[in-house]
Image: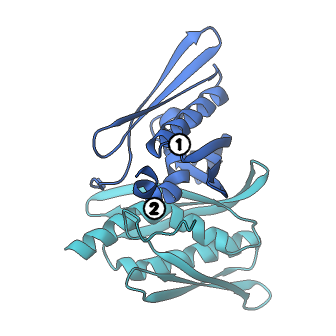
Amino acid sequence: MQFDDPMSPLPRLRLDDVRIATVDGERCRARVSLTGRDGEPRSAEWEGAASPAGRLRAVAEATLAALRQHTATALSIELLGVKSIKAFDNTLVVASAMVRWGGNAERVVGSCIQPIENPRGAALAVLDATNRLVGYNLQKAMTS
Amino acid sequence: MTPAVDNRIRFEGVAITRPAPGQIRATVTLRWHNGEELQGLYDDQDTEIGVMRAVSAATSAALEQAVDDRVRLRLVGVKTVAAFDAILVVVALASRLDDHEQQLVGSCVIKEDVEHAAVRAVLSATNRLLGSNLIYLRW
């Protein structure tokens, strides 16, 4: 059974690729690529500190930067934070963002089960946090 | 506000009653887009963690009804976490559909109360699994 989204009630973005590289001893550069229903991949990069927390943040920010390319100016999304927590005998990555659209604002949170060394965790947590509001705005853009 | 999307399940309400001393019963009501009501019940201890567990399990039970029990959901755990200047409810579930097993995790900021947040955390955990397959699983 493939749990993907061709029948999803709202358009979703697909996480294509997450790469993170150490730029010098103390910096890292994350690159995240997302594809929308038009099949067009859009990538974004973000630099941060090369610490575990800095790498999580760089991936989360790169994910939001790629996401903004799909949503244009319909949404304003700001990362509030991303962190790794131990729970239920697993490592979870949790991300929170403030989403503003029209006259509305909503604080959203998303999570995923992923070891901290896997950079996809922060990207998936950001997408989990934002998928409902991004999907709604993508759908609105498609029907208008 | 996010507008209605036809094949989504809506959260209608959550109620906590105390049928016996030291015991609580969570009743979670969801609504299918055609108006059909789905209700899940679960009893647990009258403690904060008991309430969160009961609400999460009752929400899972209501969701199982939505797909005629074709997906089984088992609560692995639920807890509150302080993060980003807020308190979150984080829930982990194990899902089973045919031979496919999957671990799911969902989270929600506590805005109203812990009961509402626990329901929304379960809906967040199952959103991708059930959202894509809801109509397929039901008919």
> Where in the figure is residue A94, as x and y percent of width and height?
62, 59
Reply above or below: B15 against B66: above
In the current view of this chain or complex, which residue is farthest to the left?
Answer: A144
When asked about the image quadrant of residue A63, the answer is bottom right
> Where in the figure is residue B6, as x and y percent of width and height?
29, 54
Q: Can residue B89 be seen?
A: no
In the current view of this chain or complex, which residue is farthest to the bottom?
Answer: A24
Task: Indicate the colour of chain A.
Answer: cyan
Reply above or below: B116 against A14: above
Tell me which numbered mark, 1 or 2, is placed earlier along the sequence: 1
Q: Residues within 10 Å of mark 1 (few under 14, many from 20)?
A: some
Q: Residues within 10 Å of mark 2 (few under 14, many from 20)?
A: many
Q: Give the Cα distance between marks 1 and 2.
A: 16 Å
Residue under numbered circle 1: B69
Same chain under badges 1 and 2? The reply is yes
Task: Indicate the colour of chain B.
Answer: blue
Task: Name the kind of residue labelled 2 in the image.
Answer: Ser
When asked about the image quadrant of residue A107, the answer is bottom left
The residue drawn where x is 63% and y is 51% is B96
The residue drawn where x is 43% and y is 68% is A77
Which of B75 and B114 lies nearest the eye of the viewer?
Answer: B75
Reply above or below: A63 against A43: above
Q: Tell me if B85 is positioned left or right of B39 in this view.
A: right
The residue drawn where x is 53% and y is 35% is B114
Residue under numbered circle 2: B132
The residue drawn where x is 69% and y is 84% is A20
Task: Name the kind of residue labelled 1 in the image.
Answer: Asp
> Where in the figure is residue B45, as x and y percent of width and height?
66, 20
**SS for tag 1?**
loop
Q: Can residue A102 be seen?
A: yes
